[in-house]
Amino acid sequence: MTETIELARKLIQIDSVTPDDKGCQDLIAYYLQSLGFKNEFMPFGEVSNLWSRLGENKPCLVFAGHTDVVPTGPESSWTHPPFAAHIDGDMLYGRGAADMKSSIACFMAACKRFLTNYPNPKGSIAFLITSDEEGPAVDGTVKVIEKLEEREEKFEYCLVGEPSSSKKLADSIKNGRRGSLSGALTVKGIQGHIAYPELADNPIHNLAPALEQLVQVQWDHGNEYFPPTSFQISNINGGTGATNVIPGEVTVLFNFRFSTEHTAESLQESVHAILDLYNIDYEIEWTLSGHPFITEADGDLIKAVNQSVKQRLGYEPKLSTGGGTSDGRFIAPTGAEVIELGPLNATIHKVDECVSVTDLNLLTDIYYDLLVDLIA
């Protein structure tokens, strides 16, 4: 069993359901300290964060990840106990096996191999590990980045170990993510008896034409990196529960997944402009979860990944900005090149989450190659 697999099993065996790290970061810090890293714990609220760095010189490659996992659901539904880190054939099972404790194990083992072969690299290596990625993500990576920015501690490259692969290892890497903007729209009317509509003001009826227009808008056509901006309604709630009462208000929850063709402000302005056309009494509470970001394909980090994957696996990964948000959205504004590269995502958040042992050893090789290429 390789060191990568031993480390992955140790991490998976810790039931670190978000936001409780349960000692995962202590294990990581102890290992990194033995390699010469300087550890700095940055707790915020209930969240554990670890910033660990080796060296001060440029360029600096940061490995970013999270030790928290989503709940297992009924453990009786699992073929193997979710925190047993059971290996069956080539597959390592457990909550966090794919998302994303195994990637952290690959980070660690790759660094050890690299520092054994290159004990005095020209650049630096750092780890940014949080226990708040699967949760609200307000006391994790974003707070660490704020602290680093305050003291002007910079880095040039960041690899997030999220499970980016689709059908086979490294067939896809994320070189950006769409922005996420949510709105909670409340439209007010006048409650009344359904038999006397002239004495009431139905907010659902008032909203319907505006809502139809919002759904029909072509917000943009996307660009070479992003699909078109998407507007989706996730919930509509109105009424008192009785069938003979016109409600006094209706609430609509919606979300934009938007490209770099828009800003959060431009989308907000467009929504308000449409609603204002219909003379309705409304208010919106906006929540911005993240801005869109992109790492250009001709950057050094993507070039290094392409070279390694082609050499190790015989093909080049495709660039993608699909999927949900990740902690990369907090890191990209620093100006660093940011990508996500990790194992297959087919079983993440599912019962019997698992990852290939062979893939993890190959992923360690790829991370090692990046260290050699970028900072040796």
Image (spheres, rainbow, N blue to C red):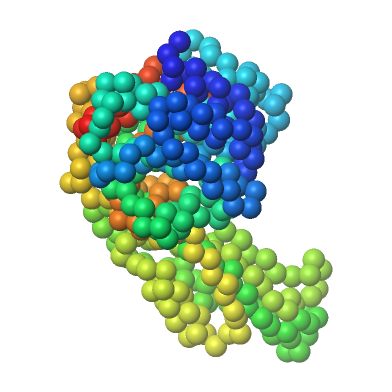
> In this view of the protein, which residue sits in the foreground, 283 or 170?
170
> In this view of the protein, which residue sits in the foreground, 6 or 262?
6
- Residue at (39% x, 17% y) in the render: 358
Is 26 situated left or right of 262 in this image?
Answer: right
Expressed as whole percent of the image width and height from the top left, the position of residue 6 reads 49, 17
79 shown above or below 336: above
Q: How many marks?
A: 0
94 shown above or below 213: above
214 shown above or below 303: below
- Residue at (36% x, 53% y) in the render: 153
Expressed as whole percent of the image width and height from the top left, the position of residue 199 reads 76, 89
Q: Is residue 169 visible?
A: no
- Residue at (48% x, 26% y) in the render: 31
Quadrant in the picture for residue 72: top right
Q: Is residue 69 visible?
A: yes
249 shown above or below 128: below
> In this view of the protein, which residue sits in the foreground, 166 or 364?
364
Expressed as whole percent of the image width and height from the top left, the position of residue 28 reads 50, 31
Q: Quadrant of the C terminus?
A: top left
Is 69 situated left or right of 369 in this image?
Answer: right
Expressed as whole percent of the image width and height from the top left, the position of residue 54 reads 36, 37
- Residue at (20% x, 24% y) in the render: 311
Q: Quadrant of the N terminus?
A: top left
Is 355 situated left or right of 238 in this image?
Answer: left
